[in-house]
Protein backbone atom coordinates (compact mmCIF):
# COMPACT_ATOMS: atom_id res chain seq x y z
CA UNK A 1 0.00 0.00 0.00
CA UNK A 2 1.20 3.51 -0.80
CA UNK A 3 2.28 5.52 2.23
CA UNK A 4 -0.01 8.51 2.17
CA UNK A 5 -2.13 11.03 4.00
CA UNK A 6 -5.69 9.75 4.01
CA UNK A 7 -7.31 12.69 5.79
CA UNK A 8 -6.38 16.15 7.06
CA UNK A 9 -8.29 17.17 10.19
CA UNK A 10 -8.78 20.29 12.29
CA UNK A 11 -10.56 20.79 15.58
CA UNK A 12 -14.18 21.58 16.07
CA UNK A 13 -13.77 23.19 19.52
CA UNK A 14 -16.18 21.89 22.10
CA UNK A 15 -16.62 21.87 25.85
CA UNK A 16 -14.01 19.65 27.47
CA UNK A 17 -15.84 16.48 28.57
CA UNK A 18 -13.31 15.95 31.38
CA UNK A 19 -14.18 19.32 32.91
CA UNK A 20 -10.48 20.25 33.19
CA UNK A 21 -10.51 22.98 30.54
CA UNK A 22 -13.18 25.24 29.09
CA UNK A 23 -12.79 23.99 25.53
CA UNK A 24 -10.90 21.19 23.84
CA UNK A 25 -9.59 20.62 20.34
CA UNK A 26 -9.61 16.81 20.51
CA UNK A 27 -12.69 16.52 18.27
CA UNK A 28 -11.10 16.94 14.84
CA UNK A 29 -12.98 16.69 11.56
CA UNK A 30 -11.76 16.14 7.99
CA UNK A 31 -11.16 19.19 5.77
CA UNK A 32 -9.99 19.48 2.17
CA UNK A 33 -6.43 20.40 3.15
CA UNK A 34 -4.31 22.22 5.73
CA UNK A 35 -1.35 24.57 5.90
CA UNK A 36 1.37 23.55 8.33
CA UNK A 37 4.11 25.71 9.82
CA UNK A 38 6.35 25.73 12.88
CA UNK A 39 4.74 27.44 15.88
CA UNK A 40 6.78 28.95 18.71
CA UNK A 41 8.94 26.65 20.81
CA UNK A 42 6.77 26.30 23.90
CA UNK A 43 3.45 24.86 25.01
CA UNK A 44 0.82 27.53 24.51
CA UNK A 45 2.36 28.66 21.23
CA UNK A 46 -0.46 27.06 19.25
CA UNK A 47 -0.83 24.30 16.72
CA UNK A 48 1.32 23.88 13.66
CA UNK A 49 -1.88 23.46 11.64
CA UNK A 50 -3.57 26.69 10.56
CA UNK A 51 -7.09 26.99 11.96
CA UNK A 52 -6.64 24.21 14.51
CA UNK A 53 -7.56 24.68 18.18
CA UNK A 54 -5.47 23.79 21.25
CA UNK A 55 -7.46 23.68 24.48
CA UNK A 56 -4.87 22.44 26.99
CA UNK A 57 -2.16 25.04 26.43
CA UNK A 58 -0.15 23.77 29.41
CA UNK A 59 0.63 20.48 27.69
CA UNK A 60 -0.06 20.92 23.97
CA UNK A 61 0.99 23.05 21.05
CA UNK A 62 4.43 24.41 20.32
CA UNK A 63 7.20 23.22 18.06
CA UNK A 64 7.55 19.70 19.45
CA UNK A 65 3.82 18.97 19.15
CA UNK A 66 3.06 20.95 16.02
CA UNK A 67 1.23 18.19 14.12
CA UNK A 68 -0.21 14.89 15.35
CA UNK A 69 -0.54 11.84 13.09
CA UNK A 70 -2.39 8.58 13.69
CA UNK A 71 -2.82 5.57 11.42
CA UNK A 72 -6.15 4.61 9.87
CA UNK A 73 -5.15 0.97 10.30
CA UNK A 74 -5.00 1.50 14.05
CA UNK A 75 -8.37 3.24 14.10
CA UNK A 76 -9.72 0.19 12.25
CA UNK A 77 -8.21 -2.11 14.91
CA UNK A 78 -9.91 -0.14 17.67
CA UNK A 79 -13.19 -0.17 15.75
CA UNK A 80 -13.13 -3.97 15.80
CA UNK A 81 -12.02 -4.09 19.42
CA UNK A 82 -14.58 -1.58 20.69
CA UNK A 83 -17.42 -2.48 18.34
CA UNK A 84 -18.06 1.10 17.24
CA UNK A 85 -17.19 3.43 14.39
CA UNK A 86 -14.19 5.75 14.70
CA UNK A 87 -14.03 8.35 11.93
CA UNK A 88 -10.82 9.99 10.76
CA UNK A 89 -9.73 12.58 13.32
CA UNK A 90 -11.49 10.90 16.26
CA UNK A 91 -8.27 10.35 18.20
CA UNK A 92 -7.45 14.04 17.82
CA UNK A 93 -5.05 13.57 14.91
CA UNK A 94 -4.37 16.27 12.33
CA UNK A 95 -3.21 13.68 9.80
CA UNK A 96 -4.83 10.28 9.41
CA UNK A 97 -2.33 8.14 7.50
CA UNK A 98 -2.44 4.92 5.49
CA UNK A 99 0.36 2.46 4.80
CA UNK A 100 2.68 3.82 7.51
CA UNK A 101 3.75 1.97 10.65
CA UNK A 102 4.02 5.19 12.62
CA UNK A 103 5.27 3.63 15.85
CA UNK A 104 8.15 1.97 13.95
CA UNK A 105 9.45 5.38 12.87
CA UNK A 106 12.65 6.48 14.56
CA UNK A 107 12.70 9.64 16.64
CA UNK A 108 14.05 12.41 14.42
CA UNK A 109 13.03 10.61 11.20
CA UNK A 110 12.11 13.11 8.51
CA UNK A 111 9.13 12.63 6.22
CA UNK A 112 8.43 14.44 2.97
CA UNK A 113 4.69 14.95 2.60
CA UNK A 114 3.52 15.87 -0.86
CA UNK A 115 5.86 18.04 -2.90
CA UNK A 116 7.29 20.44 -0.33
CA UNK A 117 6.39 19.81 3.30
CA UNK A 118 8.95 18.09 5.53
CA UNK A 119 7.92 16.86 8.98
CA UNK A 120 10.13 15.33 11.67
CA UNK A 121 9.14 12.67 14.22
CA UNK A 122 9.23 14.34 17.62
CA UNK A 123 7.70 12.94 20.83
CA UNK A 124 5.07 10.38 21.89
CA UNK A 125 1.50 11.21 22.74
CA UNK A 126 0.48 10.31 26.29
CA UNK A 127 -3.20 9.61 27.04
CA UNK A 128 -4.84 12.29 29.17
CA UNK A 129 -8.13 12.79 31.02
CA UNK A 130 -9.63 14.71 28.10
CA UNK A 131 -8.85 11.85 25.69
CA UNK A 132 -10.39 9.33 28.12
CA UNK A 133 -13.56 11.42 28.58
CA UNK A 134 -13.83 11.91 24.81
CA UNK A 135 -13.64 8.15 24.23
CA UNK A 136 -16.08 7.23 27.03
CA UNK A 137 -14.51 3.78 27.35
CA UNK A 138 -13.67 2.10 30.70
CA UNK A 139 -10.00 2.34 31.75
CA UNK A 140 -9.19 3.99 28.43
CA UNK A 141 -5.75 5.36 29.36
CA UNK A 142 -4.58 1.94 30.54
CA UNK A 143 -5.93 0.15 27.45
CA UNK A 144 -4.41 2.70 25.06
CA UNK A 145 -1.07 2.38 26.86
CA UNK A 146 -1.12 -1.43 26.79
CA UNK A 147 -1.80 -1.38 23.06
CA UNK A 148 1.42 0.62 22.61
CA UNK A 149 0.30 2.43 19.46
CA UNK A 150 0.36 6.14 20.29
CA UNK A 151 0.75 7.75 16.88
CA UNK A 152 3.43 10.42 16.45
CA UNK A 153 3.83 14.09 17.17
CA UNK A 154 5.72 15.88 14.43
CA UNK A 155 7.83 19.00 14.15
CA UNK A 156 7.55 21.13 11.00
CA UNK A 157 10.91 21.39 9.25
CA UNK A 158 9.61 22.78 5.95
CA UNK A 159 6.16 24.42 5.97
CA UNK A 160 3.49 24.29 3.32
CA UNK A 161 0.23 22.64 2.27
CA UNK A 162 -0.85 19.09 3.06
CA UNK A 163 -3.86 17.48 1.40
CA UNK A 164 -5.57 14.08 1.44
CA UNK A 165 -3.80 11.75 -0.98
CA UNK A 166 -0.36 13.30 -0.49
CA UNK A 167 2.34 10.65 -0.64
CA UNK A 168 4.60 10.32 2.40
CA UNK A 169 8.28 9.57 1.70
CA UNK A 170 10.74 8.58 4.41
CA UNK A 171 13.97 10.54 4.07
CA UNK A 172 17.40 9.48 5.42
CA UNK A 173 16.95 7.95 8.89
CA UNK A 174 18.79 9.10 12.00
CA UNK A 175 21.74 7.03 13.23
CA UNK A 176 20.14 5.65 16.42
CA UNK A 177 17.58 2.80 16.62
CA UNK A 178 14.99 4.23 19.04
CA UNK A 179 11.51 4.08 17.54
CA UNK A 180 8.31 5.75 18.69
CA UNK A 181 6.97 2.61 20.32
CA UNK A 182 10.04 2.52 22.58
CA UNK A 183 9.72 6.22 23.36
CA UNK A 184 6.05 5.74 24.28
CA UNK A 185 6.89 2.86 26.60
CA UNK A 186 9.57 5.01 28.21
CA UNK A 187 7.18 7.91 28.72
CA UNK A 188 4.61 5.60 30.31
CA UNK A 189 6.98 4.21 32.93
CA UNK A 190 9.10 1.46 31.34
CA UNK A 191 12.58 2.09 32.79
CA UNK A 192 14.39 -0.27 30.42
CA UNK A 193 12.94 1.64 27.48
CA UNK A 194 13.78 4.92 29.20
CA UNK A 195 17.43 3.92 29.52
CA UNK A 196 17.55 3.16 25.79
CA UNK A 197 16.01 6.52 24.93
CA UNK A 198 18.35 8.42 27.25
CA UNK A 199 21.42 6.63 25.91
CA UNK A 200 20.46 7.61 22.35
CA UNK A 201 19.89 11.27 23.34
CA UNK A 202 17.19 11.50 20.68
CA UNK A 203 14.48 13.47 22.52
CA UNK A 204 14.16 17.25 22.88
CA UNK A 205 15.96 18.51 25.98
CA UNK A 206 12.91 18.85 28.26
CA UNK A 207 11.73 15.30 27.54
CA UNK A 208 15.23 13.86 27.80
CA UNK A 209 15.83 15.58 31.14
CA UNK A 210 12.51 14.29 32.47
CA UNK A 211 13.57 10.69 31.82
CA UNK A 212 17.04 11.28 33.28
CA UNK A 213 15.50 12.66 36.47
CA UNK A 214 13.06 9.76 36.76
CA UNK A 215 15.79 7.17 36.32
CA UNK A 216 17.92 9.01 38.87
CA UNK A 217 15.15 8.85 41.46
CA UNK A 218 14.85 5.10 40.91
CA UNK A 219 18.58 4.34 41.19
CA UNK A 220 19.34 1.86 44.00
CA UNK A 221 20.64 3.29 47.24
CA UNK A 222 24.29 2.51 48.08
Image (cartoon, helix red, strand yellow):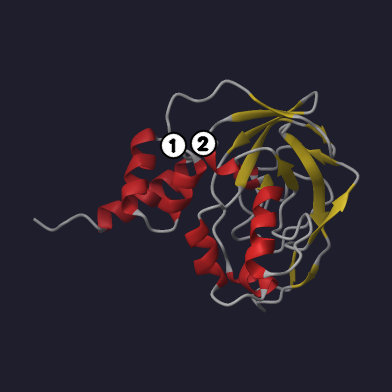
Q: Secondary structure at mark 2?
A: loop
Left/right placement of residue 46 relative to residue 129 reads right
Q: Does residue 123 appear left or right of residue 213 in this picture?
A: right
The structure residue drawn at horizontal position 72% and vertical position 73%, both measured from the top left corner, is: 16
Horizontal side of residue 198 vs 51, given as left or right = left
Q: Is residue 149 left or right of residue 205?
A: right
Task: Please tell me how many numbered marks the rendered image carries.
Answer: 2
**Residue at the farthest top position:** 172
Quarter of the image where one finds residue 214: bottom left
Residue under numbered circle 2: 107
**Residue 160: image location, x then y, percent:** 81, 31
- The picture places residue 8, in percent across and down from the top left corner, at 81, 46
71, above or below 108, in the image: below
Instruction: Using the image, tell me which numbered label, if any, was put on residue 178.
Output: 1
Picture quadrant of residue 29: bottom right
Residue 89: mark in rendering: none
Amino acid sequence: MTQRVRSTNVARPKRDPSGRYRRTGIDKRPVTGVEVSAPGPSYGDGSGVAGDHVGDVKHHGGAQKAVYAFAREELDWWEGHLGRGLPDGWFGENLTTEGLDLEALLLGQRLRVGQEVVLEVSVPRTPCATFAAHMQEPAWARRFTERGRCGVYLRVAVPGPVAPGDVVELLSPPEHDVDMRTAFAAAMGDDEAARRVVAAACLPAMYHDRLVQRLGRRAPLT
